[in-house]
Amino acid sequence: MQTKVGAFEAKTHLPSLLKRVERGERITITNRGKSVAQLVPVDGAGGADVRAVVDRMRACRKMSGPTLGEGLTTRDLVEEGRRY
């Protein structure tokens, strides 16, 4: 469940908001109607999102990208580019 509260209400009721967050609720704090911060449980602070990104990066590493050609290195290409 996600709730939105204004900055003044968050300041006034912080202890009760923290108890709700401990129970797993995500609370978005707004300032003049614009979302500016989130209170989230420590265990749910984006850990799953980070793991998903890391998994995608690992998958990209395994994919074979463009090759430089047989016997060529990145250094060879850089040196060749400097000649022109």
Image (cartoon, grey):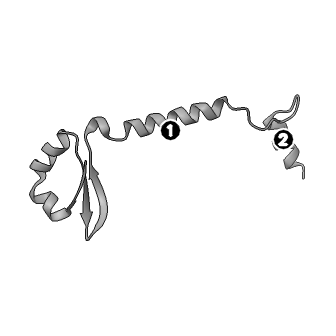
Residue 65, horizontal then vertical, whole percent: 74, 36
**Which of the 4 image quarters holds residue 3?**
bottom left
Total labels: the figure holds 2
**C-alpha separation, residue under disc 2 versus residue under disc 1:** 31 Å
Q: Residues within 10 Å of mark 1 (few under 14, many from 20)?
A: few
Q: Would you say 80 lies left or right of 37 here? A: right
Residue to which mark 2 is pinned:
77
Q: Nearer the viewer, mark 2 or mark 1?
A: 1
**Where residue 75 appears, x then y in whole percent?**
80, 37
Task: Name the residue at 84% across, 41% down.
Answer: 77
The secondary structure type at the circle numbered 2 is helix
Q: Residue at x 22, y 45 (%)?
A: 25
Q: Is residue 81 left or right of residue 61?
A: right
The structure residue drawn at horizontal position 15% and vertical position 45%, both measured from the top left corner, is 20
**Pointer 1 residue:** 53
Q: Counting residues from the N terminus, which is met first, the one under dot 2 or under dot 1? A: 1
Which of the two residues, 26 or 67, is positioned nearer the viewer here? Answer: 26
Q: Which mark is residue 20?
A: none
Name the residue at 89% across, 49% down. 83
Judged from the image, the secondary structure of the residue bearing numbered disc 1 is helix
Q: Quadrant of residue 49?
A: top left
Where is residue 53 shown, x and y percent of the image?
50, 38
- In the rendered view, would you say 39 is above or below 69? below
Task: Report the amino acid beneath label 1.
Answer: Val
Give the answer, above or below, for where 21 lies relative to 11: above
